[in-house]
Image (tube, rainbow, N blue to C red):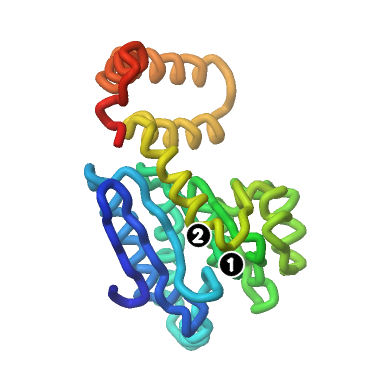
Amino acid sequence: MENGLLVRVEGAVATLTLTRPQVHNALDEALVVNLTQAFQKLGVAEAVRVVVLEAEGKTFCAGLDVAWVRRSIAAPREDNQRDAMMIAVLMDSIDRCSKPVIACVNGAALGGGVGLLAACDIVLASEDSSFALTEVRLGLEPTIIGPQVVAAMGARASRRYWLSAERFDAREAFRLGLVHAVVAADKLAEARDRMVENCLKGAPKAQAGSKEAIRLVSEAEHGPDLMRLIAHRFAEQRIGDECAEGMAAFLEKRKPGWGL
């Protein structure tokens, strides 16, 4: 454990745990750097198939550390630009991690904490979790986490919750698409393990390609160029090693080579 982050790798599963419960797992410079490096390293670690993001204590993440924000007020403009880019790079590193990333939320996720969740692929939340984008109450915009949050919640919902900064519960987060499943607090670990098991059944290259394809399809203009591109990708995958193994395993009624 170092600077608020515990990294555990057990078999094919890497678990990242925020360990600053005394400050509600708020993000400071060290934690932002360590999280970014962890996701970048795990993204290229062949032995790792799934990444889980969790937190110690009663709060998942309270956003940016207030002490860090206060220091930034008196800091030179260049330092502020650098710090802001650090946060943007963190969100992008989670978003673009080639492995399935599962977040487990037990408690509050505020500001940048919502950004962390929005950047993950799958979010599981306990029934008593709560969420808020509180930046405007501190004189800030949530823009640094905007690409991920708007992609997760949509522009219309973002208008309401960015501007009002009101709290919303896990059921509302589920309705908005920020959270994928809501479970009882004592069932969260069970739901996490079940989701990890589901993700481990997928082919690693196909999962990495799927994440890339989702971004491509959502950002590209629909038309002949996109049709040709996705047809090319699909055709190449059908003659790839993973498809050959997956089809053989299906027909022979056995687990594929990547199955655990």
Instruction: Please say if 27 is above or below 213.
Output: below
Q: Position of residue 219 (x, y in %)?
A: 54, 35
Q: Is residue 208 visible?
A: yes
- In the image, is 30 to the left or to the right of 24? left
Q: Position of residue 201 (x, y in %)?
A: 38, 33
Amino acid under label 2? Leu
- In the image, is 252 to the left or to the right of 28? left
Q: CA distance from mark 2 to mark 1?
A: 9 Å
Badge 1 is on which residue? 109
Between residue 192 and residue 62, name the one nearer to us. 192
Badge 1: residue crowd in 10 Å (few <14, some 14–19, many ≥20): many
Badge 2 is on which residue? 116
Between residue 47 and residue 45, name the one nearer to us. 47
Depth check, mark 2 against mark 1: the one in front is 1
Circles 2 and 1: CB atoms closer than 8 Å:
yes
Instruction: Please say if 251 is above or below 197.
Output: above
Badge 2: residue crowd in 10 Å (few <14, some 14–19, many ≥20): many
- Local secondary structure at mark 2: helix
Amino acid under label 1? Ala
Q: Is residue 82 visible?
A: no
Name the quadrant containing residue 250.
top left
Q: Which mark is residue 182?
A: none
Instruction: Please say if 36 is above or below 76.
Output: above
Between residue 172 and residue 133, name the one nearer to us. 172
* Tally of numbered discs: 2
Residue at horizontal 47%, vertical 86%? 71
- Image quadrant holding the N terminus, namely bottom left
Residue at horizontal 60%, vertical 47%? 180
Residue at horizontal 35%, vertical 70%? 5
Q: Position of residue 13 (x, y in %)?
A: 32, 50
